[in-house]
Amino acid sequence: MAATDSVYVEHEWLAKNLGNKAVVVIDMTADDVQYMRYHIPGAVRISYRDIVMQRKDKVSVRLPDSQLLKVLGQAGIQPTRHVVIYDDMGGLNAGRLFWELERIGHKKVSVLRGGLVQWVLAGHKVDNQAVKSTPVQYQSAGEGVDNEADLAAVKAASEKGTATLLDVRSQEEYVGHPKYPRSGHIPGAKWAPWEDNVDFENGFVPKAAEQLLNKLSAIGVKDKDAPLIVYCRSGHRASQSYLTLRDLGFETVRLYDASMAEYSRQPALPLVKGMSEK
């Protein structure tokens, strides 16, 4: 993605392209009930739980690629189609599928700015008829993007400074609790809560780029080519921050998918309590 490109499309553009067969709209609103109540006309439903799984240790992670490609195929997605994803959560769910599609090398993927909230506020039509897509076989999209970090990469970032760690959880989670020894944050991680990325009071749209960049600059994140690793508890909230950083033009962003659910279970690995990074 070029630095001048946006990961978002506007509701006006989508309204004009709903009948475009090269475009497939994916609904990732909070739950299936919302989809049945109303959704953007023609939108195919993929839920967050459709694209994650639990490992044997109960840590939530992404699906194996073979299973992900089946989910995409069932939704009628092909590598040549422009996928436009929306949710009603400020990009919390949409960011996850965006991350996945970038990871596997899907060329045309966007998120609807403001999602379903902005769509309704703008007065566009909605529908309550479930859309049954024609299943296809999703062939490999080509060369993917190295946007996933594992535990070893996170340890290297913490110990050797190979990447900047961004903890996007709440302040309470970042600080930790004195009664819980395996709480707090990864040493060296900067606090950058995902909620600060969204203007929830004005249609769930992303906050202005200048405002977001100023906040990042204030914690020392300025170089858009420098490697970043985002994490939360389960890789869910961090997906929204991944989306935000990509839209701001940061080129080397990785998501620690297993996040604190995995890291905190490693008794030999250190954790820091309080607001200091180390």
Image: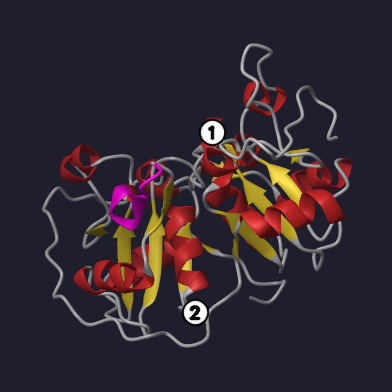
* Start-end of magenta stretch: 49-57
Residue 200, label in figure: 1
x and y percent of residue 19 in the render? 25, 73
Q: Residue 79 in magenta?
A: no
Query: Residue placed at 59% from the left, 37% from the top?
Result: 199
The quadrant of the rendering that contains the C terminus is top right
Residue lying farthest front? 268
Q: Quadrant of residue 149 in the image?
A: bottom right
Disc 1 marks a residue whose amino acid type is: Phe
Instruction: Left or right? Give the position of 127 relative to 198.
Output: left
| Amino acid residing under circle 2 | Gly
43 w.r.t. 204: above or below:
below
Distance of label 1 from label 2 (alpha carbons): 31 Å
Which residue in the structure is indicated by mark 2?
A: 105
Q: Are marks 1 and 2 in contact (CB under 8 Å)?
A: no
At x 82%, y 50%, the residue is 159
* Residue depicted at 51% across the width and 62% down the height: 99
Residue 264, percent from left and from top: 60, 36
Left or right, 131 with reference to 30: left
Location of residue 229 with respect to 225 vertically, above or below: above
Instruction: Assign a secondary structure to mark 2.
Output: loop
